[in-house]
Image: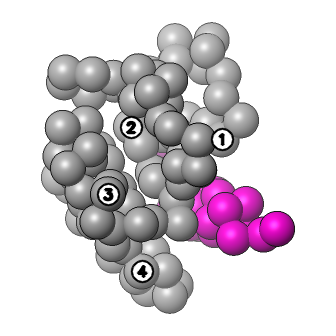
Amino acid sequence: MICDDSALFRRGLALLLTDVGVDVVGEAADVAQLQALLPGAVPDAVVLDIRMPGLDGWQVIDRLPPGSPPVLVVTADGTALERAHPMLLAKPYRPEELVAAVAATIERSTSP
């Protein structure tokens, strides 16, 4: 699942992930769309932009119930690094770095 307010980023990442065999089960432009999609989608991981309109990504992470899929945080906001999260990737990065980070996040969710 991808949640980012940039349609270009969402589509580009979805294409990159699909090319390496990762199924993208949904895309959301904001947190409200993400919350609407999550119950029916059951993703292995969520790629989440930290700075979006409405609730920001930190608020989403703080409100995730136990058993939620792991979150890979992506951001272009350098100040977000101050509130470091175990899975945080700062933009810009190479496409292969992002694909590897998504794969590692999915691996965390599927390993015992």
Disc 3: which residue: 39
Q: CA distance from mark 3 to mark 4?
A: 17 Å
Q: Which of the marked residues, 1 or 2, is nearer the chain's N terminus?
A: 2
Q: Residue 27 falls in which quadrant of the image?
A: bottom left
Placement of 79 over or under 30, stated as above or below: above
Colour scheme in use: one colour
Disc 2: which residue: 49
Q: Where is residue 86 drawn, in percent x and y?
A: 71, 35
Front in this rendered view, residue 57 or 78: 57
**How many numbered callouts?**
4
Placement of 46 over or under 50, stated as above or below: below
Residue 94 forms part of the magenta stretch: yes
Q: CA distance from mark 4 to mark 1?
A: 20 Å
Q: CA distance from mark 2 to mark 3?
A: 19 Å
Q: Amino acid at mark 1?
A: Met
Can residue 87 be seen here? The reply is yes
Disc 1: which residue: 87
* Number of residues whose C-alpha sits closer than 10 Å to that of mark 3, classed few (under 14), some (14–19) or many (20 or more): few
Can residue 14 be seen here? The reply is no
